[in-house]
Image (spheres, rainbow, N blue to C red):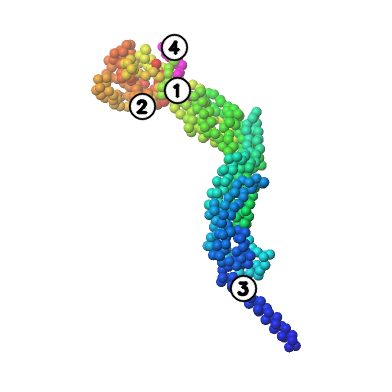
Amino acid sequence: MKKRKAFVIGIVTAVVAVGAIYVGQALHYSSSQVFFKDTEIAGVNVGGSTASQAATKLKSALKDQQYTLKDGSKTVTTIKTNQVDLKVTSQAALKQLISKQNVWSWPAHITTATADSISLNASDENQASVQTLAKKIAAKANQTRTAAKDATFSYQNGSWAVTKEQKGNQLDATKLAKSITSAIEKGSTTVNVDGDYIQPAVTTTSASFKAAKTKATAITQQTYVYKLSGHKITIPSATLASWVTFKNGKLTTNNIAIKAYLTKLSSKYGTINKTRTFKSTKRGTVKVKAGLYGWSIKVKSETPALAKLVLAGKGMDRTPTIQGSGYHNSGTDIGKSYVEVDKVNQHMWVYKNGKVVVSTDIVTGLPTTAHHTPTGVWVIWSKQRNATLRGQNDNGSSYASKVKYWMPIDDTGVGIHDSSWQPEYGGTWYKKHGSHGCVNTPPSKIAAVYANVKVGTPVIVF
């Protein structure tokens, strides 16, 4: 019985002793702040070392350490540790690693078979320095390497043809930086970069590629029509396709090309800068050059509107945004309501809905360069009662003429108004007694003119 008791006491004593050793060793690691036995950092054994001692060992071991970057069997370049600011030798970082050790697991580190290889997470610590180096290496190496090509599609013979992506071997600086960092942390002097290629961003299996091609197909299968001044213009599928651009995995439009198309369309059908053929009252068909009157497509605002409709892929039946005056859906320009000023016959007619409502002799400007009434298709852009017209005479003196009715027609101050100072109208009176350019109208007729025209009425002067 005594022997058994002694045996039990012996076991308890042994257990207590082992426990004391276990606790003592844990406290040792906790108080001494050293790495566990056979701990490795960047391939260097720092077991049993404090942060300061480990830093010294690492600095010595990594000083002038050379790394070879290999792409398969080919050497890309070699680098040395002094080319990067390695935080792997930072005492602060090493102390942090020691503090993260679980001191109660020290028995697992008694033999070299359980040695740790600790990473300092240099991808964060050395990020700026390593990435700068990686960018330089990639930039130089890529000059002679093949770039990857994204999958794309193009419009050929009435359908969209797909060109598959192509792999290249240019180096991705971000991936390269990670490989360099990993090699340093593991203590490997060879950096394998054959997995660090820049990959095609878009492939034929990419969701963005499939969606874009589907949308492009829909665009060219839809009908896009402009209704423009009595004309119907269908935009050809090939033209629509030429505006579509697949870029950075997204379908967009080439708005420069769309703008050019609309500008050409406006030039063809618009009237703002065109000479008109006009059937006059007394002189038959005449040609009258452009003035302020006329319309054009408002290209600036129509361009993004058309681009949006194209990308929607639903077709369109639309009249473009118009600017200026004189636009009619029927295709006419001057229309049936207008003012005709015949300088040769010194006569003016006001037409309303195709019928003459006012017919009167007039006095136009002196037939000189300074005071002639400008030929052109103008427009009544304002109407005003009881205005004072101001200007300058040939001798340099100023004048101020009060009129009861004022209708400006161009952008130089010329307009239609009453002229109580004129003793006669018509004939050749204007040759010596003409106005400063305005259309002088008899006071007895001006009220009827004013009443029968509205802002926007064309005025044909020839």
Q: Quadrant of residue 96?
A: bottom right
Please state which of the two labelled residues, at mark 2 or mark 4, is closer to the viewer. 4
Label 3 and label 4: CA atoms lie apart by 120 Å
Residue labelled with disc 2: 383
Asked if the residues shown at circle 2 and circle 3 are in contact, with their CB atoms under 8 angstroms apart, the answer is no
Q: Please provide percent x and percent y for residue 227.
A: 54, 27
Q: How many marks?
A: 4
Quarter of the N terminus within the rendering: bottom right
Residue at screen point 24% across, 23% down: 397
* Magenta stretch prevailing secondary structure: loop
**Does dot 3 land on a helix, a strand or a loop?**
helix
- Earlier in the chain: of badge 3 and badge 4, it is 3
Residue labelled with disc 1: 273
| Above-or-below relation of 315 to 89 | above
Label 2 and label 1: CA atoms lie apart by 24 Å
> Which label was assigned to residue 284?
4
- Earlier in the chain: of badge 2 and badge 4, it is 4
**Does dot 2 land on a helix, a strand or a loop?**
loop
Q: Please provide percent x and percent y for residue 11.
A: 70, 80
> Which label was assigned to residue 179?
none
Highlighted magenta segment, given as a residue range = 269-283
Asked if the residues shown at circle 2 and circle 4 are in contact, with their CB atoms under 8 angstroms apart, the answer is no
Residue labelled with disc 3: 25
Q: Please provide percent x and percent y for residue 15.
A: 68, 78
